[in-house]
Image: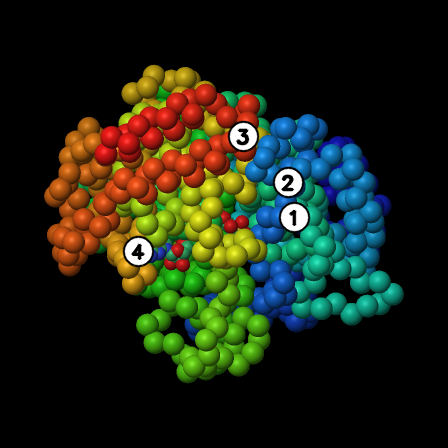
Amino acid sequence: MTQNKKLSNWVNDMAKLCKPDKIHWCNGTEDEFSEMIRLLTESGTCMKLNEDKKPNSYYFKSDPKDVARVEDRTFICSEKEIDAGPTNNWKNPKEMKEELLNLFNGTMRGRTMYVIPFSMGPIGSKISMNGVQLTDSPYVVISMKIMTRMGAEVMNKIEDDFVPCIHSVGYPLENGTKDIPWPCNETKYIVHFPEERAIWSYGSGYGGNALLGKKCFSLRIASKVAKDEGWLAEHMLIVGITSPEGKKHYFAAAFPSACGKTNLAMLKPSLPGWKVETVGDDIAWMRFGNDGRLYAINPENGFFGVAPGTSMVSNPNAFLTLEKNSLFTNTALTDDKDVWWEGLTSEKPEHLIDWNGNDWTPKMHHPAAHPNSRFTTSASQCPTMDQDWENPNGVPISAIIFGGRRASFIPLVYEAFSWQHGTFIGATVSSETTAAAAHQVGQLRNDPFAMLPFCGYNMGDYFGHWLKISQSTASEKLPKIFNVNWFRKDNDGKFLWPGYGENIRVLQWIFERVEGNGGAVYSPLGNIPTENSIDLRGLNLPAETMKELFNIDKEAGLSEAERVQNYFTIFGEQLPKEMNDELEKFKERFTKL
Ligand code: GTP
Ligand code: SPV
Ligand code: MN
């Protein structure tokens, strides 16, 4: 319960609308967690994993139609359509509210409404923001306990500026209907009212659709707040890098969903003497400090990470993090009640239960784990957490890195000529789509700043905000901007670059550039490493491969320019003039090549 009138009135109003049997105010205790697990076990939603393999961990299988974010059902309902922009779905907020009021009417019948007070960022920090999520899903309650600071301590601190987030799986239990393991609804709505700062989510119980503190609050709503207040809310990991000489820099990197943020944030360096420490793996809130430098915090408290591809070899730090007290959703299950996914072991087990609950053997052609199966686990368990990861003032950012999945054209790494050019690089990030959202996988699409599905206002204005923010400080205090591509392929479709722990070799070059060293040479995309300035010692990489990784093709560049030009037209008047200037310069550089 709460003394806060605004909060109690809102909860009462929403209870009148949703008509739950009960209201439960979450306190965030272990007892409460156990009670949720008891309920989830009873409804067949979860199964305890083998205590010897994964202590205190639970296995979940979602409805096969509720496995990823639903971008075509995600709406930004700003007062004016132009403020949602060409990259977001928009509906008139009044009409949308009416529709939602209909959908939410009685949606929690036969269920409990859980009231989850949560803080994005350390509790009580000046740059943290509070939210309250109402949900009828105990799975969401336990996930929010891991992913955010949640419970009684936050409740005591909540004032009138909390972000109200209402969520229902859309499966009321009327007239004694029996519950099913993963209740959800075919109709889905993930709706944001940026001016009102409110979130309404209906019909899905999974990931970013349902854990409203994450993409809905910390990116879509926060990006709008950030624009209004002069800071940045970004789809970025934050990582601390210490050189063998003991110098340290923090980098922030924006890659689209399922393109390597968690892996880079926890990277185990293959080069001796280098140390990598984790601040965050998905979201960064960044503001300028009194010293004129850009400081970042990770608003989250845990990781909701892609399971496939994660192993003791590829990402030992993630693996050590998820070994206990974790939730696993849509992975496969072994005969001894442990989890398994593609890439976990070099040999596939002889028998599994796949994510659909069916028997599976290696002869079968479909993956045993869903490609967007994920682990939910606490940041505090990660062996590489940085000593300043909860510093309320954040960590100073020396470099910003963009990237995506590009089978061709984009080299392993290049450096922007300027902040404005870096903004152009961010604005033109494109990537082959992944299973993180419900759509066709492997299609190249524009995903500016890796924020395409997460920007809560007009993307053209967002480019303008990035340009404007650089005027908050002296240019030498701005982070340097880079672009990387771990995903370039050879003619046989194999990745050219080994990736993962070997990415330290690229980070080393970026580190040296930040320090004012490191060999660089002009290319039409940006400055690239001189030959031998990327340390390849201990890596058996043919010189040919390195050449291929940095091959910059004139024809491909010119057709990229055309692609970008076409894309830019969708922004109309909202496209800052500087972006067209940069495009012209880009064309010119490739024409001269
Ligand atoms: P979201 O949580 O969706 O925002 O994703 P993310 O950006 O954190 O992606 P993540 O690090 O979980 O990686 C997604 C997939 O890419 C996993 O299957 C990884 O194994 C794979 N991956 C990550 N880094 C590399 C790399 O350097 N090279 C290659 N080839 N694959 C990688
Ligand atoms: C992403 O899709 O970028 C994620 C997973 O980080 S989700 O929380 O489902 O959005
Ligand atoms: Mn993400």
Tell me the SS state at disc 1: helix
Q: Nearer the viewer, residue 347 or 40?
A: 347
Q: Are marks 3 and 1 in contact (CB under 8 Å)?
A: no
* Res. 259 visible in picture: yes
**Residue 73: assigned label:** 1
Residue 538 at what x, y percent from top left?
14, 56
Mark 1 belongs to which amino acid? Answer: Arg
Q: Do the residues labelled 4 and 1 touch (CB within 8 Å)?
A: no
Residue at 43% across / 39% down in the picture? 563
Of the residues under marks 2 and 1, which one precedes in the sequence?
1
Which circle, 3 or 1, is nearer the viewer? 3
Mark 2 belongs to which amino acid? Answer: Asn
Horizontal placement of 592 versus 222: left or right?
Answer: left
Of the residues under marks 3 and 1, which one precedes in the sequence?
1
**Residue 359: assigned label:** none
**Residue identifier under label 2:** 89
Of the residues under marks 4 and 3, which one precedes in the sequence?
4
User: What is the spatial separation of the Cα atoms under label 4 and label 1, in whole angstroms?
Assistant: 33 Å
Of the residues under marks 4 and 1, which one precedes in the sequence?
1
Q: Are marks 3 and 2 in contact (CB under 8 Å)?
A: no
Horizontal placement of 162 versus 247: left or right?
Answer: right
User: What is the spatial separation of the Cα atoms under label 3 and label 2, in whole angstroms?
Assistant: 14 Å
* Res. 116 visible in picture: no
Of the residues under marks 3 and 2, which one precedes in the sequence?
2
Residue at 74% across / 52% down in the picture? 113
Mark 4 belongs to which amino acid? Answer: Lys
Of the residues under marks 4 and 2, which one precedes in the sequence?
2
User: What is the spatial separation of the Cα atoms under label 3 and label 1, in whole angstroms?
Assistant: 21 Å
Q: Do the residues labelled 2 and 1 touch (CB within 8 Å)?
A: yes
Quadrant occupied by the C terminus: top left
**Residue identifier under label 3:** 571
What is the crowding at mark 2: few (fewer than 14 residues within 10 Å), some, or many (at least 20)?
some
